């Protein structure tokens, strides 16, 4: 698998001169990443933007580690035969028109599989968007350059999806709003040969990956997948598509996947310590926050909620109960410490409504005092802090204190950030670069807390 992620010399079969075609975007991405070690193949043109093109892979004057194929499905078998003759060991087929289209496409896919097996070629895809190795700036995908250039930040989260456009769309959405450090991004499509279990085996041992997030429509080798999941302490977060009868039909037409029974699959994954989620935003939220916070799971999930709104505390309390967690019973010494910053007429409780204390002692002093008090409470396993980010000359948040408390006590702090967009983003960056995860919506923070503490 390493050769897929770390090729030295690459070729593109299907390089296009049309700037509106994915084949041209692939050309631009691969040229930007590989330079002189990139060889475009197009039998109809001699050059693209002054880059020499070759009539076939057999004409390329170099040994090729990996070829990306983006041509009509009917022409792929011949291209594979030429790759085998050339001695190309790895091929990513990004073309669609295979098993997802019906019997003819299945027969075409089977033919390609035989060619690859006989020629000693490993195949990734088809019907996919390929892969990105963020740490090495290797983009083998027709993902638009504006999504990744100057935006991707090397990190510890690796993403595996059967849907290419879903990954690209959500990445574009979330990267524009929240810091997100990525290691590998993998779109595997129909899984003709390379599947999620191959990738899990690679990522479990990958030193650049600490968190693995997957969107799967089927699980080809369940027993081996479960064994691998049980063997690692790396968090594995899975969104399983095709849970309903409608979703199963959609999965067949999307990637030709036969979705398994959802209840059986969920049970098997949970028993393997896999964190199962129900939406793409939830998948990325949980994975990203695992990448930010370095926290060991606990046996219980008793939460302290620090909020600027009584209503926010009520809603959060319901959400905590919905996910099988508890509101912590704050110890008498903790309540006494909280009382020091509250008005005389108010006895603090959990959720802790901080607004009256803000009015009395100011935001910065109140937050320092209350966060330290609840983090020191032995009956508290995690803290959910609600903040409203508004422009100010001096930030009211003692980021370093909160980071130190997390490290000293081994308890997560998750922050729901509301407020003016630019200020909210600045606050988010400051929290997350210190290992404190943030969310944009109250329920998403509760879900993250459940994952960080209970690994569920």
Image: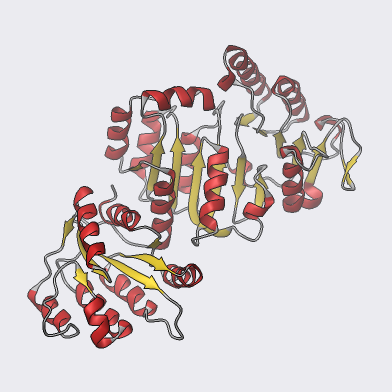
Q: Is 305 positioned to the left or the right of 126 in the image?
A: left
Considering every residue shown, the one lying at the far left of the view is 332
Image location of residue 233, percent across then percent down:
35, 50
Q: Residue at x 68, y 33 (%)?
A: 89
Can you see residue 137?
A: no
Q: Is 277 positioned to the left or the right of 310 in the image?
A: right
Q: Quadrant of residue 194?
A: top right
Q: Quadrant of residue 419?
A: bottom left
Image location of residue 236, percent across then percent down:
39, 46
Image location of residue 52, percent across then percent down:
89, 43
Describe the colour scheme in one phrase: secondary structure
Closest to the observer: 135 or 385? Answer: 385
Closest to the observer: 205 or 30? Answer: 30
Image location of residue 55, percent across then percent down:
87, 31
Q: Residue at x 34, y 70 (%)?
A: 387
Q: Classify the position of the N terminus by image quarter.
A: top right
376, above or below 82, in the image: below
433, above or below 35, in the image: below
Q: Is 335 positioned to the left or the right of 391 in the image?
A: left
Closest to the observer: 213 or 35? Answer: 213
Q: How many marks?
A: 0
Q: Is 71 positioned to the left or the right of 418 in the image?
A: right
Can you see residue 356?
A: yes
76, above or below 382, in the image: above
């Amino acid at each position: 698998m390493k050769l897929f992620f770390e090729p030295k010399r690459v070729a593109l079969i299907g390089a296009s001169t049309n700037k509106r075609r994915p084949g041209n975007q692939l050309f631009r991405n691969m040229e930007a990443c590989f330079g002189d070690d990139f060889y475009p193949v197009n039998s109809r043109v001699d050059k693209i933007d002054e880059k020499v093109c070759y009539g076939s892979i057999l004409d390329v004057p170099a040994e090729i580690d990996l070829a990306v194929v983006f041509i009509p499905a009917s022409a792929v078998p011949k291209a594979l035969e030429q790759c085998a003759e050339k001695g190309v060991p790895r091929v990513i087929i990004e073309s669609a028109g295979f098993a997802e289209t019906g019997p003819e496409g299945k027969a075409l896919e089977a033919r390609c599989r035989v060619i690859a097996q006989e020629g000693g070629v490993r195949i990734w895809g088809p019907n996919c968007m390929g892969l990105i190795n963020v740490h090495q700036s290797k983009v083998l995908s027709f993902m638009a350059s504006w999504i990744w250039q100057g935006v991707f930040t090397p990190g510890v989260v690796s993403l595996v999806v059967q849907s290419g456009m879903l990954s690209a769309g959500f990445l574009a959405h979330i990267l524009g709003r929240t810091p997100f450090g990525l290691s590998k991004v993998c779109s595997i499509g129909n899984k003709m040969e390379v599947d999620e279990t191959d990738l899990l085996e690679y990522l479990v041992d990958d030193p650049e990956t600490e968190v693995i997030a997957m969107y799967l429509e089927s699980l080809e080798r369940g027993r081996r997948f479960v064994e691998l999941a049980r063997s690692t302490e790396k968090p594995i977060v899975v969104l399983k598509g095709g849970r309903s009868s409608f979703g199963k039909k959609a999965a067949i037409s999307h990637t030709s996947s036969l979705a398994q029974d959802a209840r059986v699959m969920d049970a098997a994954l949970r028993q393997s310590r896999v964190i199962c989620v129900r939406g793409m935003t939830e998948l990325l939220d949980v994975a990203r926050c695992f990448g930010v916070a370095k926290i060991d799971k606990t046996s219980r999930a008793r939460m302290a909620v620090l909020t600027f709104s009584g209503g926010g505390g009520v809603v959060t309390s319901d959400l905590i109960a919905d996910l099988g967690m508890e509101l912590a019973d704050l110890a008498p010494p903790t309540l006494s410490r909280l009382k020091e910053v509250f008005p005389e007429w108010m006895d603090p409780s959990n959720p802790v409504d901080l607004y009256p204390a803000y009015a009395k002692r100011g935001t910065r002093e109140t937050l320092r005092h209350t966060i330290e008090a609840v983090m020191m409470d032995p009956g508290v396993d995690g803290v959910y802090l609600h903040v409203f980010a508004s422009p100010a000359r001096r930030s009211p948040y003692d980021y370093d204190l909160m980071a130190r408390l997390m490290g000293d006590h081994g308890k997560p702090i998750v922050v729901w950030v509301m407020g003016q967009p630019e200020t909210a983003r600045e606050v988010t960056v400051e929290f997350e670069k210190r290992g404190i995860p943030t969310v944009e919506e109250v329920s998403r923070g509760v879900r993250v807390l459940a994952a960080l503490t209970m690994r569920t």
